[in-house]
Image (cartoon, rainbow, N blue to C red):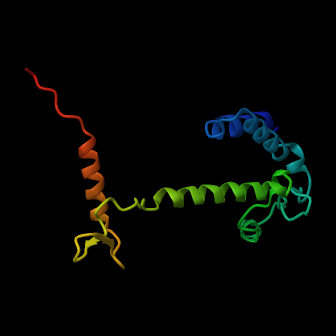
Amino acid sequence: DTVPWEALTYVTGQINYGGRVTDELDRRSLMSILGRFYQPNVLASENFSLSASGLYYVPDEGSFQGVIDYVTGLPLEDDPEVFSMHGNANIALQRQEMSRLIDTIVSIQPRVAPPAAGIGRVASKDKSLSRAQSTAPSPEDLVYAMTEDLLQKIPAPISEK
């Protein structure tokens, strides 16, 4: 029996992952990486190495438990070398993930508006307003001030006469 390597590569790369990989250059890269794994040498060689370090390899035919032991002994995060990529690819990935994390944190942070006129101020004996020493406007006060500001900006209704 012959293994349909080309068909397996196509099904995996274009059909299974093809919908998720939308950039044409990324798709070409994916197909190139799959081409390294989906080839006759993978089955013909003993412990076919998938990386330069030899950490990643195709285990010999053996017991199911032996394969489970090999897989559980692998690092939790794949090294870029297993995909024939330079070590800097990991740095780029970490920077991208950190940027996404920071963007998410900033997007869920509560927005704080500057205090509106009259909020956070206390009338003194001589009727002049001075800043309250330790009181900041409450969220409700901020919402109220913004609502008042928006209401003042709404134009008067047009009469139907």
Above or below 41: residue 141: below
Q: Is residue 79 left or right of residue 46?
A: left
Residue at x-position 85% and y-position 43%: 39
Residue 29 seen anywhere in this rendered image of the structure: yes
Instruction: Determine the image quadrant of residue 9.
Output: top right
Q: Is residue 82 left or right of residue 156?
A: right
Q: Residue furthest front?
A: 126
**Quick one: 14 or 23, which is closer to the camera?**
23
| Residue 86 position within the rendered picture, expressed as x and y whole percent measured from the top left | 86, 54
Q: Residue furthest top?
A: 161
Q: Is residue 153 left or right of residue 89?
A: left
Q: Is residue 53 left or right of residue 18?
A: right
Quadrant location of the C terminus in the rendered image:
top left
Residue 8 seen anywhere in this rendered image of the structure: no
Residue at x-position 31% and y-position 59%: 117
**Quick one: 107 or 146, which is closer to the camera?**
146
**How many numbered circles does the render carry?**
0
Residue at x-position 79% and y-position 40%: 29
Instruction: Determine the image quadrant of residue 74.
Output: bottom right
**Quick one: 6 or 148, which is closer to the camera?**
148
| Residue 41 position within the rendered picture, expressed as x and y whole percent measured from the top left | 90, 47
Quadrant location of the N terminus in the rendered image:
top right
